[in-house]
Image (cartoon, grey):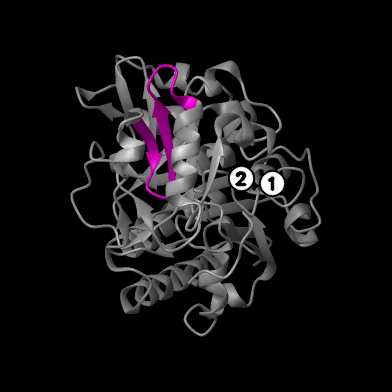
Amino acid sequence: MIEHVAPLAPDYRNACVTHLVPALLEGMEKPDWVPAAVLESDRVVLVVLDGLGWNQLETRNGVAPTLAAMEGGSITTVAPSTTAAALTSISTGRPPGEHGLLGYRVPVSDGVLNTLRWNTADGDARTRHNPASIQPLDCFGAQRPPVVTWSAFADSGFTRAHLAGARLAGYSDRAGLVDNVVDLISASEPFVYAYWDGIDHTAHEFGLADRYDEELAECDTMIADLFDRLPSGTAVMVTADHGQVHVGDSMIDLPAEVTTLLAGQSGEARFRWLHARPGAAAELLVAAREAFNDVAWVRSSNEVIDAGWLGPVVTDAARGRLGDVAVLAREGIGFVDPAEVIPIQLIGRHGSLTPEEMLVPALGAVV
């Protein structure tokens, strides 16, 4: 059982992933949780290890000695604590309420958009839903830095949305990531963003056991390889977009008292948005609270906005993508949406506001 009773809200004013790019690339901020030597360096690599939560890392120092030796601690990610929202918040420096990519699945005019695959039930949505319209903010302060990521992601809708304008350097394996980063820094690039998603995929498919530790160890070796090969004086900052919770088969179907009031669902299993039938929003909130208060935080959309979970500003476009009721898993469970098709059972999940999901590393060192 997860031992806490209050949601851990994003710290948008201070220790949050939204402040990394403004500090490291734009020089607009000097947060005290970024090592001073990193802020003073003329060359910085920001490595995002998708899915590496602080709580998971802190209990595995022996598995990741390179990361354990780096300076820093934990900061918060955004809400929901999920890839589409958090990676876009890192690249734009803005909370989800401003950039509008509010999670894994968001409602659009002709259905629900899977923001990572950029498709709806009708297939590829890149022409029907322009990524630049869904997410209109500048990325990386419009400075166009190099971004090292999977070659297969180069033309995806999500890449167009959250890495717009960046110069992409593609890789096909872990060694390719290291080679690209080293080559770019050696060519006098002052800032390089590098992304690796192996920890997230491993946690989803295998949970937080041996396979997770093996992937974390390989990522730690990857960071050590960067330290060995980067020019002296280069700063490396490591962070993540979210942590993980073991869910396994602990998935809850919505009861009839809830489903009869629904027009649909969006979001993800641990941060589920319920969309009410016309005129049924108040009744849906009551029914959802009666059904899930013992295992989840249940809030109206106005309560989510007023709590600041999506940031101090929520645009009209973002408001239009919210459901009427948010159900955030507090225990190690998820909520079923029959319309959400996933080819494998996800053992590790994320999205809610538990410390396991919300706390991520902010670790830095200068080689």
Tell me whether circle 2 and circle 1 mark residues in contact (CB < 8 Å). Answer: yes
Residue 228 placed where, x, y %? 53, 71
> Considering depth in this image, is 16 or 273 the residue closer to the camera?
273
Q: Position of residue 214 (x, y in %)?
A: 35, 76
Asked whether residue 268 is drawn in magenta, I would say yes
Q: How many marks?
A: 2
Question: Does 58 sit left or right of 162 as displayed?
Answer: right
The location of residue 283, given as percent across then percent down, is 47, 30
Report the disc number at residue 191. Answer: 2
Give the residue pinned by disc 1.
Answer: 24
Few, some or many residues within 10 Å of mark 2 (<14, 14–19, 20+): many
In the image: residue 164, left or right of residue 42: left
In this rendering, the label closer to the viewer, 2 or 1: 1
Q: Cα distance, mark 2 to mark 1?
A: 8 Å
Q: Residue at x 31, y 62 (%)?
A: 250
Q: What's drawn in magenta, residue-wise?
A: 265-281
Secondary-structure class at tag 2: strand
Mark 2 / mark 1, whichever is N-terminal: 1
At label 1, which amino acid type do we have?
A: Leu
Is disc 1 placed on a helix, strand or loop?
Answer: helix
Q: Residue 177 at x, y = what percent?
A: 40, 55
Q: Quadrant of residue 302?
A: top right
**What residue is shown at x 51% (from left), y 71% (from top)?**
56
Residue type at numbered disc 2: Phe
